[in-house]
Amino acid sequence: MRLRTYILGAFMVLICAVFFIWFLPAARVSFSNDNADASAAGSIAATSSASTADDYATTTPAPPPPFVVTHISTPDPVKAFYFTSWAAGTPSFQKEMWSLLDGSTELDSIVIDVKDYSGRVGYIVDDPRFKDPLIDSVGSAQDRIPDIEQFLAALHAKGVYVIGRVAVFQDPYATTVHPEWAVTDARTDKPWKDAGGAYWLDPDSSDAWAYIAAIAKQAYAVGFDEINFDYVRFPSDGAISDAVFARIATTTKTASTTTFMTKAEVITSFFSYLHDELSSSGIPISVDLFGQTTSETNDMGIGQIIENAFPYFDFVDPMVYPSHFADGFQGYAHPALHPYEIVKYSMGTAVARAIAASSTPSKLRPWLQAFDLGAVYTPAMVDAQKQATYDVGLDSWLLWNAGAIYSRAEVSASTSASMI
């Protein structure tokens, strides 16, 4: 009986234990780690910040690097043709230009106006690295050749040597902005005009010299490979007796007020100035001279003597267009009809004078006629001038056509041309 009582009691204890475990709510304990939560939040924020920066970099690209200007070395020989700045910036002329520079012609170079007879610079420089305050103050730039740096770089990519031509002292634009730089008219004390109505910078104006040098330096900075100077002379037509120059003697000026120079001395001083300003900086420079300077020994009233140019320029370019020689020159009633003879005589004389002046004839590089004046100039007549150049021992030449119009036959190799 007692055993049964013990068994029943144990069973009841077991039932109670099961009841408490099954039906009473169990305690729920949670653990928190503040440091871990902060780390996770920081990770999320960093990820968000990095994502934002990446998105910004994707939608706002970094500015492109500055344009890199290129130059190419002077070819040997130089075989070039002339283009106005207007033509160089006109799509139809550009198409023809590229066609003639496609490698199937003799051409390896081009001459393009930087500053032409109007006094206007043929492009606008926007890159602050190349801007010049003096040029900007004159305001001579016009947007004739858009994107000048890229245009020149495209020519360089084709291996084309680019010569920038600067018309120097004939300048109807700068003289209106700075009349104090101009040749003065003794009758009016205002800027003097030549027979064609153009104004001229005084060849002895130091301010005009600085302006020309600034244009040349800027042209080289944007990519022109060589700077060619034209109209480096005193005016030759019009009422010259009324033209007053800074240091040229006239009947109205006395030695007591002015130290006089000859026209040739003034021009030679300018030659020297260009050399010091440009050649010393490694900029190739050349000068155009009247064709008659090859045979005339005086300055012809314009200040040009060929021997005076040799020491200061890398190239001397006489403009030996047969049509520009006077009737009767060397016995030819109409020199334009004798292209070979006129060019051979002129450049042969120039070679002899270069040697006599202890210079090198290789500096000589004639301008040849590729336009109709005095005769209709056929490709055969252009070839005759090239042949004359070769026959005096020279191999470089420049073709001039003021309209920038050339036939492929004029710039293709002649079957008769050969070096001596």
Image (spheres, rainbow, N blue to C red):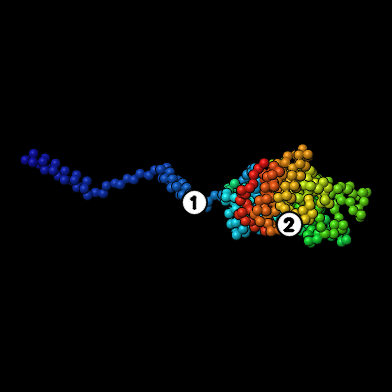
Circle number at residue 247: none
Q: Is residue 391 visible?
A: yes
Give the image location of residue 347, x and y in percent: 73, 46
Quadrant into which the N terminus falls: top left
Residue holding disc 2: 117
Which three-letter amino acid code belongs to the residue tagged 1?
Thr
Residue holding disc 1: 58
Look at 91% across and 55% down and name the residue there: 252
Which three-letter amino acid code belongs to the residue tagged 2?
Tyr
Look at 50% across and 53% down and name the residue there: 59
Q: Nearer the viewer, residue 35 or 182?
A: 182
Task: Give the mark toward the camera: 1 or 2.
Answer: 2
The tag earlier along the polypeptide, 1 or 2, is 1
Question: Are the residues flagged by discs 1 and 2 in contact, CB closer than 8 Å?
Answer: no
Quadrant into which the C terminus falls: top right
Residue 276, quarter of the rendered image: top right
Give the image location of residue 61, x and y in percent: 53, 51
Look at 69% across and 42% down and name the residue there: 393
Q: Residues within 10 Å of mark 2 (few under 14, many from 20)?
A: some
Residue reaching furthest to the left:
1
Whole-Å distance between the Cαs marked 1 and 2? 50 Å
Q: Is residue 154 visible?
A: no
* Label 2 residue SS: loop
Q: In the visual, does 243 lie left or right of 90? A: right
